[in-house]
């Protein structure tokens, strides 16, 4: 029997079962379609390989524990961004749990303690977070991942208590700062374009003799009064 040391991640779509009682088959199909379209392309970027889909869950294998956790963070970031613009019925929340160890490979499937522990940890995880075990913690690059130790927990069928860590949500705050920076850059670009168009127009009118120095002064005075009225109107 072939065995390998791998990192195993479970990514589970939260509350999907609850949605089945209140959604049509078309709505459920669309929700899963959006979920898969957003999440699946992220795994290979971090060296992840989908082993199988279990309903609304993915089991993914990685070679690197650091890449596995970074992948989980990216999944949460992408879904966070999606939820900011999606209707409530199409918002997606996932739970992610990661463990590593020796696994058995049989007919393309994986078996072993790492699979069992990651699966059981996912079921007790909070939505919107990334959890990983002490085994992952010991092997990963700690400088790349903000984390907090939550304590030890006993899982059924596992002889020892498992240390559990959670990625700090500050990575989401960093992601939000990047988005705000991009919005500011876009606003500055739009403002620069407006200034350029106005400057070019004024230069053309002035150079062609249509506007004199006095009329330009009056022009800017009128523009100032216009924006001042707009400001008072919408403040």
Image (cartoon, rainbow, N blue to C red):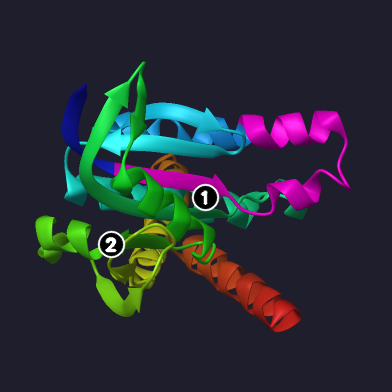
For the record, the magenta segment spans 8-33
Sequence-first tag of 2 and 1: 1
Q: Describe residue 222's horizontal placement relative to residue 50 as left or right.
A: right
Q: Position of residue 181 (x, y in %)?
A: 36, 62
Q: Residue furthest top?
A: 107
How far is disc 2 from disc 1 in space, using C-alphas?
23 Å
Q: Quadrant of the N terminus?
A: top left
Q: Residue at x 28, y 77 (%)?
A: 149
Place residue 84 in its image quadrant. Answer: bottom right
Q: Describe residue 14's horizontal placement relative to residue 78 as left or right.
A: right
Q: Position of residue 71 (x, y in %)?
A: 32, 46
Q: Describe residue 80's horizontal placement relative to residue 147 as left or right.
A: right
Dot 1: element: helix
Mark number, residue 79: 1
| Magenta stretch encompasses residue 216 | no
Place residue 207 in its image quadrant. Answer: top left
Taking the image as drawn, is residue 146 in sight? yes
Taking the image as drawn, is residue 190 in sight? no
Mark number, residue 133: 2
């Amino acid at each position: 029997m072939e065995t390998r040391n791998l990192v195993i991640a479970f990514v589970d779509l939260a509350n999907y079962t609850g949605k089945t009682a209140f959604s049509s088959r078309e709505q459920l199909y669309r929700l899963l379609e959006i979920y898969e379209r957003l999440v699946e392309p992220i795994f290979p970027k971090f060296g992840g390989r989908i082993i199988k889909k279990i309903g609304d869950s993915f089991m993914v294998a990685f070679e690197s524990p650091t890449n596995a956790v970074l992948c989980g963070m990216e999944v949460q970031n992408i879904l966070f961004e999606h939820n900011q613009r999606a209707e409530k019925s199409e918002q997606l929340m996932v739970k992610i749990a990661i463990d590593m160890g020796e696994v058995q490979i049989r007919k393309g499937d994986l078996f072993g303690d790492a699979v069992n522990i990651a699966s059981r940890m996912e079921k007790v995880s909070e939505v919107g977070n990334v959890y990983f075990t002490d085994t992952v913690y010991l092997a990963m690059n700690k400088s790349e991942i903000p984390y907090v130790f939550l304590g030890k927990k006993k899982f059924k069928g596992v002889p020892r208590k498992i240390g559990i860590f959670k990625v700090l949500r500050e990575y989401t705050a960093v992601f939000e700062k990047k988005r705000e920076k991009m919005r500011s850059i876009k606003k500055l670009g739009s403002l620069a374009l407006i200034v350029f168009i106005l400057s070019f127009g004024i230069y053309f009118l002035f150079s062609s003799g249509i506007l004199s120095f006095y009329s330009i002064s009056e022009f800017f005075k009128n523009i100032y009064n216009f924006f001042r009225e707009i400001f008072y109107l919408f403040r």
